Image (spheres, grey):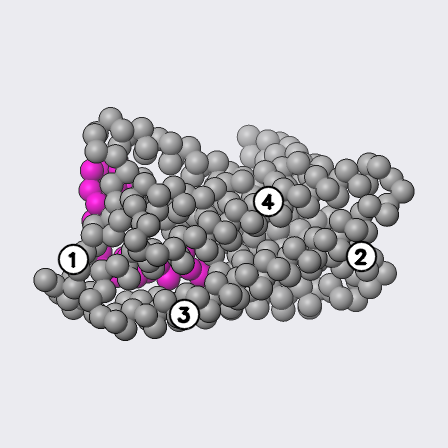
Amino acid sequence: MSNSSSISEFLLLPLADTRQLQLLHFWLLLGIYLAALLGNGLISTAVACDQRLHTPMYFFLLNLALLDLGCISTTLPKAMANALWETRAISYAGCAAQLFFFLFFVSAECSLLTIMSYDRYVAICKPLHYGTLMDSRACATMAAAAWGAGGLHSLLHSSNTFSLPLCQGNVVNQFFCEIPQILKLSCSASYLREVFFLIFSAILFFVCFVFIVVSYVQIFLAVLRMPSEQGRHKAFSTCLPHLAVVSLFLFSGFFAYLKPFSISSPLLDLSVALLYSVLPPTLNPIIYSMRNREIKDALSKVLQYALFHFP
């Protein structure tokens, strides 16, 4: 038996048992990672470079793209390196840092998605007050609050999790360091304190989800009163995918962090982790922006500028 003071590294879950499958998983993860980098990078570039996109909606989209880049960059590069070099090891400090930054980006993203639903609610349901309620100072304050809340939430959980005594080995049955897998290694009843914190966090996230749903119900009711069929279609095509990805993101996270240890299995845990940690950062650029004509026009101008000025 070992304790946390003697653990210098953790062993992550191998994605496959054979070398051929490991390489296949590496190329799959690389493709997903590059797609997420490209999509979120293009959104960030378009919003930053085009003056017409300096509006509250696109400001929040820029923040979402940065959070998605951070989230997926915290987990996939290490998983790809382990698959490529046939290793499972991650240092104790590396594991703690990975857990902290992953929770930071995920928590901030949940807060930001709530803010984005409020932004759309004000834009559609209270258009005459939009300029007042969503001025530049209010947007900057809300974005800073989302990032700050993510940092505080992450600091609370990561410091509490890694203060627990660990005596059940150093094998983490996940492709990245995740709180439930670290708790399984604890040999003290004090891990129940972290379980309490997780339940409290889940309640906060659920409140955010309820706020998002209520905002979109109000939006849908307003949209149904629109005389323009094209306007209704545009609003629904934007809001419904947004709500679907938010639901997938939050409920798969709830299941991963709150399910009993008795129903845990490596395959189930891996599948759920992919749903809330990899899929949203990859899909968000498509759902939020790549179908947006203004984003496409901005990207077209950026590419034309690059081609003509950097031969």
> For mark 2, does the 10 Å Cα neighbourhood hold few (<14), some (14 to 19), or many (20 or more) residues?
some
Specify whether 103 is left or right of 85: right
The answer to if 87 sits in the magenta stretch is yes
Real-space CA distance between mark 3 and mark 4, rounded to the nearest whole angstrom: 27 Å
The local secondary structure at tag 2 comes to helix
Specify whether 281 is left or right of 89: right
Real-space CA distance between mark 4 and mark 1, rounded to the nearest whole angstrom: 38 Å
Which residues, given as a range, are shown in magenta? 81-105
The local secondary structure at tag 4 comes to helix
Q: Disc 2 or disc 4, which is closer to the eye?
A: 4
- Name the foreground residue: 248 vs 43: 248
Q: Circle 4 is placed at which residue position?
A: 244
Counting residues from the start of the chain, the first of labels 1 and 2 encountered is 2
Real-space CA distance between mark 3 and mark 2, rounded to the nearest whole angstrom: 36 Å
Residue at x-position 43% and y-position 48%? 277
Residue at x-position 16% and y-position 57%? 169
Q: Circle 1 is placed at which residue position?
A: 169
Q: Is residue 143 visible?
A: yes
Real-space CA distance between mark 1 and mark 3, rounded to the nearest whole angstrom: 24 Å
Q: Circle 2 is placed at which residue position?
A: 125
Say above or below: 229 vs 123. above
Q: Circle 3 is placed at which residue position?
A: 197
Q: Quadrant of residue 29?
A: top left
Image position, residue 220 (x, y; %): 76, 49
Counting residues from the start of the chain, the first of labels 3 and 2 encountered is 2
Q: Are marks 2 and 4 in contact (CB under 8 Å)?
A: no
Badge 2 amino acid:
Cys
- The outermost residue toward the front is 262
